Image (cartoon, grey):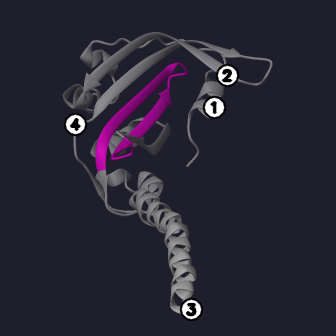
Amino acid sequence: MRAGKSKAPLLTMVIVVIVTALPVIWAIFYFGIYAGYGSWKARGHQEFAKNGIAQIQPAAEMETLFDECRHFIIYTGSESVSTWNATAYFDGRYQLTMQVPVEIESARLGTMIGEPRFFLNEVDVVSLRDSGQVSVSYSRSFNFDVDEWQKVFSSGGDFSSIGFTLKTTAVPHFKKIVNADRPSN
């Protein structure tokens, strides 16, 4: 009879250990491997945006044409695709963004894995709210590809070379949207 009594506490202890261990094992796997892999995979990405400009030719070209140019990485498709963004502000009313998918190997090494796309927006009005927020209204937008960008770049930033004539008057408070809109890096 004593042998039967000693098996029950042992079996109970094994069940308690298993029931307790399963959530712990799941948490270690999820947070340590799955979530940790996502963080490891993104390690160095924003540093690459600062350091890798020379490896992303259109971004380097934008740097030579525009004084106000920022570079940062965004993630699309459940963070599986890294997208390089270069955004330039110029002539007191224009915002030019170039986006291209990139493969990032480290904080200093990466390559374009797709074709760049360009988005030129003409700011119409910048509004300042009492709360300190800045909002913007656009009057025109123009999207173009890398071939058209090469025409703009070769002409020293002349967008009329691809059929977009720039207005020469600045928009009041344009600098506020420049400062509010760009990530700091």
Q: Secondary structure at mark 2?
A: strand
Q: Which mark is residue 180?
A: 1
Sequence order check, earlier mark of 2 and 3? 3
Query: To which residue does mark 4 refer?
Result: 115
Q: Quick check: 185 left or right of 102?
A: right
Q: Secondary structure at mark 1?
A: helix
Cα–Cα gap, marks 3 and 4? 77 Å
Do the CB atoms of the residues marked 1 and 4 lie less than 8 Å apart? Answer: no
Residue, x 36% and y 64% (percent of image)?
106
Judged by depth in the image, the label closer to the viewer, 3 or 1, is 3
Residue 114 colored magenta? Answer: no
Three-letter amino acid code at disc 1?
Ala
Q: Viewer-proximal residue, 35 or 166?
A: 35
Residue, x 39% and y 21% (percent of image)?
120
User: Quarter of the image holding residue 133?
Assistant: top right
Sequence order check, earlier mark of 1 and 2? 2
Q: Which residues are magenta?
A: 78-102
Q: Main secondary structure of the magenta part?
A: strand
Sequence order check, earlier mark of 1 and 4? 4
Q: Which mark is residue 2?
A: 3
Quarter of the image that includes the N terminus: bottom right
Q: Secondary structure at mark 4?
A: loop
Three-letter amino acid code at disc 2?
Val
123 shown above or below 178: above
Cα–Cα gap, marks 1 and 4? 28 Å
Q: Quick check: 106 left or right of 167?
A: left
Do the CB atoms of the residues marked 1 and 2 lie less than 8 Å apart? Answer: yes
Three-letter amino acid code at disc 4?
Glu
Residue 30 at x, y percent in the picture: 46, 60
Three-letter amino acid code at disc 3?
Arg
Cα–Cα gap, marks 3 and 1? 77 Å
